[in-house]
Amino acid sequence: MKVWINGKLVDKRSAKLSVWDHGTLYGDGVFEGIRVYNGKVFQAQAHIDRLYDSAKHIRLAIPYTKQEMTDCIYETLRANGQADAYVRLVVTRGEGYLGLNPFLCLRPNVFIITDQIKMYPQEMYDNGMAVIIAKTVRTSPQSLSPAVKSLNYLNNIMAKIEAIDAGVAEAIMLNEAGQIAECTGDNIFIVRDGVVITPPPEAGILIGITRGVVIKLAGKLGLTMKEQTVWPKDLYQAQECFLTGTAAEVIAVTKINDKPIGDGRVGGVTRKLLEAFRQYIRQGNW
Ligand code: PXG
């Protein structure tokens, strides 16, 4: 397998970064996780835009144009003969010194890995998944905006460890106000009295690309959709709950902290949205 690194396609084993890279030393960098369906990069523009927005936020200048970056993804996919893949696009601050000053780093390192996607087991799509509410609070937007997809994922990893310890696949994270923000690698939605509700950006979330697609599809299906504050009690009163993400696509949550959501089975609205999402992917005009 080939990895694209700083303009070159190299063998997977030769794709290496310096230990002096501030990405390695401090998690100083940004990334994207993108799907490729049937030879086409899903929501390429939205992902590339988010990468550049994340980079801008941390004052990191990506040494390629957006078009060059998109072309390089396709070049890597071609080199690996992949039509369906998961793309990890990473920009680190680059090689520097042991001090924090990011501006002493030489030049950002940019690399692209195209690999197989690891989705949740099919059984979870059929019957729904169990999640917990993590005690780890989502990073405050005043500390580091969760809208920035930075290489520093320890906040999410600490919540993920809680999920693993509890024997479930995901954890819901609250913000400092105790409102529902999102999961460690997925956005969250609930359905109450037929209305589809998801926390707004101000709740302190990564504004998911899949979330955006699902909001659009919900509109097309004639569902009422609201970005609205969600409290833990709203979860338990919801008829349905589901998660969205690049890896997950759309997946039902049927149990939270061991309490069943709705009747404990995958709900009708979730099924409709999952089917609409899969159809949208099959149609390929995105
Ligand atoms: N919230 C967080 C914190 C995320 O990291 C999402 C929401 C969903 O966003 P998208 O744009 O993907 O709809 C993410 C995305 C992985 C993996 O390997 C995680 C993500 C994306 C791709 C792969 O666990 N998280």
Image (spheres, rainbow, N blue to C red):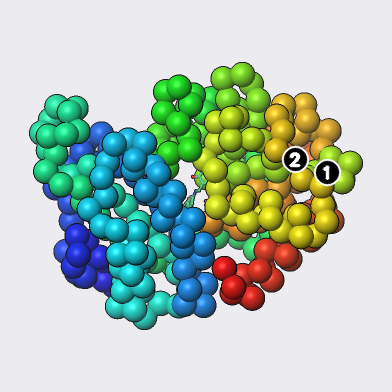
In space, the residues marked 1 and 2 are separated at their CA atoms by 7 Å
Using the rendered image of the protein, determine whether residue 173 is visible from the camera's viewpoint: no
In this image, 158 relative to 204: left or right?
Answer: left
Viewer-nearest of labels 1 and 2? 2
The three-letter code of the residue at mark 1 reads Val
Report the residue at 76% width, 34% height from top.
Answer: 235
Q: Quadrant of residue 230?
A: top right
Q: Which residue is tagged 1?
A: 195
In this image, 230 relative to 152: left or right?
Answer: right
Q: Quadrant of residue 67?
A: bottom left
In this image, 46 relative to 123: left or right?
Answer: left
Q: Residue 271 in the image: x percent, y percent? A: 78, 59
Q: Name the residue at the top extreme.
A: 177
Residues 240 and 30: in front is 30
Q: Considering the numbered disc 1 on the image, is that residue within a helix, a strand or a loop? A: strand
Q: Residue 70 in the image: x percent, y percent? A: 36, 65
The three-letter code of the residue at mark 2 reads Lys
Report the residue at 36% width, 72% height from top.
Answer: 74
Q: Quadrant of the C terminus?
A: bottom right
Q: Residue 221 in the image: x percent, y percent? A: 80, 60
Mark 1 CB in 8 Å range of ligand 1? no
Q: Quadrant of the N terminus?
A: bottom left
Report the residue at 75% width, 55% height from top.
Answer: 218
Rendered position, 143 above or below 239: above
Q: Quadrant of residue 78?
A: bottom left
The reply to whether discs 1 and 2 touch (Cβ–Cβ < 8 Å) is yes
- Check residue 226 in the rendering and tell me which mark sits there, or answer none: 2
Rendered position, 266 above or below 57: below
- Check residue 76 in the rendering and tell me which mark sits there, or answer none: none
Mark 1 or 2, nearer chain start: 1
